[in-house]
Image (cartoon, rainbow, N blue to C red):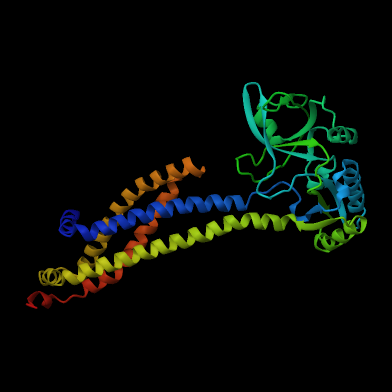
Amino acid sequence: MPFGPIFRAMTRNRSRFLLIVAEVALTLAIVANCVSLIRESQASLKVESGFDDENLLWVGSRPFAEAFREDAYLHHAIDSDLVTLRTLPGVRAASNTSFIPWIGGGSSTEVRLGGNRYRTQIYGVDPAVFDTLGVTVIQGRNFTPAELEAGTGSDPDKVISPVVISEALAKLLYPNGGALGKIIQDPSGTDSFDVIGVFDRFYNPYGWPIGEYAVFLPRRSGGFSNFGFLVRTQPGQKDALMPEIEKALLASNDGRNVRVRAIQDIRREYDSRDRAVVMALNAVMILLVFVTALGIVGITSFSVAERQKQIGTRRALGATQGDILRHFLLENWMVTSIGAVLGTGLAYAINVGLVTLVQQAKLEAWVLAAGVGLLWVVGLGAALGPALRAARVAPAIATRSV
């Protein structure tokens, strides 16, 4: 079937077809970027921390007794709590640390190497943190108890601290290897960090793209406002231990409030934002495609009703029902294709803005191709009903005067 006559017929009713072209273009642009955002959100839902999240608990302690204001009392309470936690049946390891996995943030700083600065997460930990998280020091060594005590002290002349860094940060700072024994500095250049070890498998979501970068310092963590512990349980013991941990800590010192949370619950709360985004974007896509299909049905139905005599004349001159059906389906395909071409450009324009503003991943070509294919199918499906009605118009309609 020739395209020329169909296109010329479309130009006589430009406004209605331009409306569908604009609707298809806008739908493609929005749906393609929605799919890209959904894929990014779904990928974040599948990210693994590298820790034993399934068996990890966070134990938060908020003191209200004035005695906790004294450092000596606070440090004694922390050490006593660790002994209590580690002796509970079902506890595999426990660590005093400021690090909470999957909280969606934490502590960060910049480290300076040469003339460059690199942002990284930074946390105070004790030597038990690696066993508690379930990660391994793959290069160098762990902290010693003496380094923990030195880091907890108040020596104003201490400017070099031993640190253990994540493997990803080591590769960022030293792409060719050899991070062990190197000295890195804070942004001001007054404090230095001696890299004594590198540990594997670290991911913790953060506002900046530094989820895999971390520096651990040997330091008791906490103060009068709060302090906490990570506890790794034996498999299957987590739920039973949560109330027991609270009772045991309050029994040893009731001058505070204690809250125990499963790391998996913390992650579910963090992931709820991505799940909400996925649900909202899916709803937007379904609504847009549905509205576009309704628009195509309406415009095609109106076009069929308006051209009854023209269709009857063609039928009287020998056009078959298949010819009429193909005419309207091809007309719809041409309109959808023009909209898809314009929508492709608009989709990339929107994606450039999203990449610039919110660091969204670049739009992949296959997503657009799939979007175009979807709109072709939706367009042809929406036009099929009106086109079949047009094909059933009798030749005798051409002779009617009303």
162 left or right of 338 in image: right
Which residue, as the protein is rendered here, is positioned at the far front? 66
Image quadrant of residue 378?
Answer: bottom left
Query: Does the image show residue 267?
Result: yes
> Which residue appears at 62% of the width and 21% of the height?
115
Check the picture and name the quadrant holding the N terminus: bottom left
Note whether 74 is above or below 6 in the view shown: above
Residue 92's spot in the image, x, y percent?
Answer: 86, 52
How many marks can you see?
A: 0
Who's the residue at 73% across and 27% down the image?
Answer: 179
Q: Residue at x 13, y 75 (%)?
A: 395
Does 392 sit left or right of 253 as displayed? left
Task: Provide residue 51's location: percent of width, then percent of height.
Answer: 74, 48
When asked about the image quadrant of residue 317, the answer is bottom left
Vertically, is 96 above or below 9?
Answer: above
- Specify the quadrant that holds the C terminus: bottom left
Which of these two is toward me, 282 or 277? Answer: 277
The percent position of residue 212, horizontal first and vertical second, equals 66, 40
Residue 333 visible in the shown view: no
User: Which one is nearer the viewer's eye here, 150 or 162?
Assistant: 150
Q: Is residue 6 above or below residue 118?
A: below
Query: Is 324 on the left or on the right of 58, as rendered?
Result: left
Name of the residue lying farthest toward the top: 114
Q: Position of residue 192 (x, y in %)?
A: 75, 25
In the displayed structure image, the side of residue 295 where residue 60 appears, left or right? right
Among the 4 quarters of the image, the one containing residue 158: top right
